[in-house]
Image (tube, helix red, strand yellow):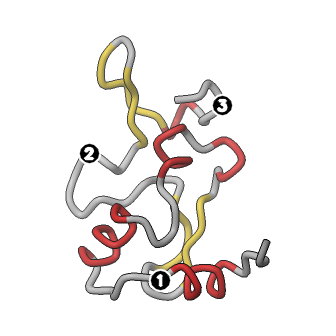
Amino acid sequence: MGGHVPAGLAVEVNASTCRMRGTDHVPIRCAALTGKIGQSVACGIYEWRPSPCHEFEEGCHACHQARSRHGLPPLDAMTAREILRIPDI
């Protein structure tokens, strides 16, 4: 998991794969996720997050699916930028 995820947050699946604790049962909630879904959430280990989290971008298909599981509407790129306060490039 990138070698930097705190050991207590990672669960070994096999010799070459780990997953974040909390992502192996329903409802899925990563142990590193802080806050309340639908209001304000953040990754508690953002600087050390594993590679799958780097691929999960706000407004992507996986983001829409995750939001849908919680009864939330999809984010468009502008809304995501406003919520996350990402500066325009």
Neighbour class for label 3 at 10 Å: few (<14), some, many (≥20)? few
Q: Which residue is mark 2?
A: 24
| Image mark for residue 44 | none
Q: Is residue 75 above or below residue 66?
A: below
Q: Amino acid at mark 2?
A: Asp
Q: With respect to residue 9, does 1 lie above or below?
A: above
Position in image of residue 3 (x %, y %)? 62, 24
Q: Is residue 49 left or right of residue 39?
A: right
User: Identity of the amino acid at label 3?
Assistant: His
**Label 1 sits on residue:** 76
Residue 5 x %, y %: 60, 35
Q: Is residue 82 left or right of residue 54?
A: right
Q: Where is residue 79 drawn, in percent x and y?
A: 55, 88
Nearer-N-terminus badge (3/1): 3
Is residue 23 shown left or right of residue 6?
left
Identify the residue position indicated by label 3 in the image.
4
* SS of the residue under disc 3: loop
Q: Is residue 82 above or below residue 15?
A: below
Q: Amino acid at mark 1?
A: Asp
Quarter holding the C terminus is bottom right
